[in-house]
Amino acid sequence: MANENKLQAVIAHAKEYGFVFPSSEIYDGLGAVYDYGQWGAELKKNLKDYWWRWMTQTNDKNIVGIDSAIFMHPQVWKASGHVDNFSDPMIDNKDSKKRYRVDHLIEGFIEELKRKAFEKIRGKSEDSLLDEGHIVSVADEDVIKDENYLKAIQLEKDLDKLIAADDFAGLKQLIEDNKIACSVSKTVNWTDVRQFNLMFSTEVGSVAEESSKIYLRPETAQGIFVNFLNVQKTARMKIPFGIAQIGKAFRNEIVARGFIFRMREFEQMEMQFFVRPGTQKEWYEYWKAERLKWHLDLGIDPAKYRYHDHVKLAHYADAACDIEFDFPMGFKELEGIHSRTDFDLKSHQELSKKKMQYFDADVDPETGKAYGNYIPYVIETSIGLDRAFLAVLSEAYEEEDLSTEEKQDSRAVLKLSPKIAPIKLAVLPLMKKDGLPEVATELMAECRKHFKCFYEEKDAIGKRYRRMDAIGTPFCVTIDHQSKEDGTVTIRHRDSMAQERVHMSEVANIVKAAVSY
Ligand code: ATP
């Protein structure tokens, strides 16, 4: 299935089967905001539990979890740099009133130029050919010499230079010189370029004064930093240790596309790992490798993941990389791993005038003295829960052709890892009579104590199987007349569709073995 079609199919499936709905749909939705339906909420919760358990329970790296508030003192965002730096340069088209991120607008134009160069020389414009590495390896000299291609390369250089220098007048000039038009109005009637902060703000209390302005947190990490000493002291944590948190974050994204990939309200699962200064490099490498293992444990093809090391580092980082996933829109960031130095704790210490130091009683073998007081360095792992949801959902989704010579048939199936599937077992009496529902209810009562089950007695069994396939239920059990006689049932496996006869007393254990982690 072509990528664009795959994304559309996943969006439609997510809506039809109760995974994700557009927010406030009866009012035509709200841009880049989504609601999770009955099965989506289960899948999301299972992903959270899987992460939380891995971080705070099965891990031997001394990590505890917290749950801090969304609202924080406004000074927090001053110290973190979000008030001054968490912004993108934007430009508005005066005719269509459409707002663009300047870099996206210019990059779109650059892509168009490259596409033209390819079309002219090769007579085709597959998006894959736009990938820079591919161009150089497959392109004939003619492409590289094409005037559109050369212009695109020059524009890329100019864009990087102007963005790095915050030269807004220069960026506007670049747009005008190249006659880059709005996709809606087709005009080049642009406002000046302005910085647009991505944080949402609101007022606390009843008085609308500047001092009462607060922000909805754009990341969960700061809740961990400001509680660093509370946790360290009350849990008597010794460095190295970590603090994990799952929670909502809000960003007024301007270009919000890709379904739940880029939302204005989303959820993050973040862990800050506090280490002794000087050891951050080895811990960074450690978490980089460990986090990939977490992803791979979900059973997805390893070729779907890759690292992207950052060349340009944020002001607070001394190393950073993304774990990228091959979404239906191509490889994109799923999780970030950042070596954040002591930037955040130090900034909070400076602004709050409260010490953010840790006393390390361990002896430094080089000096023979205790390490003493210092501000720890931090390695952060930060994954978007909604992006993880999209990754597993789009990877699990398959349309299978089951046609035989006699009849045409197909099914939509979610081949989700049983660990995170919304429902683990469907219990289906073959008929609504002859005491079969009673046997099924008994089995339900036993199994629902251990995992999420679903009971259904309506419709032909084939239809019921298909509905369970579509929401990713790994096991279905059918109760028939023989079940009443000898206590055996048919268990059907979602992926292979294979069926086997087992005793009812074995069902719970079979399912438990597949879903536990
Ligand atoms: P991007 O470059 O895609 O905007 P980012 O580098 O700003 O992401 P971080 O600030 O590192 O992202 O946030 C950590 C994680 O939070 C990301 O890896 C991503 O999974 C998730 N995330 C960030 N912004 C959004 C969003 N608008 N919607 C959904 N998830 C998001």
Image (spheres, rainbow, N blue to C red):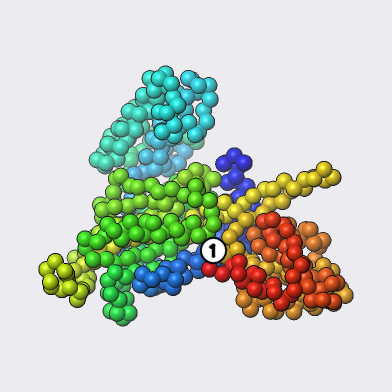
- Position in image of residue 379 (x %, y %): 31, 61
Q: Quadrant of residue 106?
A: top left
For the point 14% across and 66% down, the residue is 366
Q: Which residue is mark 1?
A: 44
- Tell me if the residue at label 1 has its CB under 8 Å from ligand 1: no
Estimate how packed mark 1 is, as few (under 14), some (14 to 19) or many (20 or more) residues with alpha carbons within 10 Å.
many
Depth check: 161 or 42 in front?
Answer: 42
Q: Quadrant of residue 475?
A: bottom right
- Position in image of residue 254 (x %, y %): 43, 48
Is residue 84 shown to the viewer in this render? no
For the point 30% across and 76% down, the residue is 237
How many marks are shown on the rendered structure? 1
Depth check: 275 or 351 in front?
Answer: 275
Residue type, mark 1 in image? Lys
- The quarter of the picture where the N terminus appears is top right
For the point 24% across and 40% down, the residue is 165
Q: Quadrant of residue 168?
A: top left
- Position in image of residue 210 (x %, y %): 30, 63
Is residue 18 shown to the viewer in this render? yes
Q: Is residue 502 above or below residue 201?
A: below
Depth check: 438 or 502 in front?
Answer: 502
- Position in image of residue 310 (x %, y %): 33, 47
**Which type of secondary structure does the marked residue at label 1 adopt?**
helix
In-image side of 257 versus 485 (left or right): left
Depth check: 115 or 341 in front?
Answer: 341
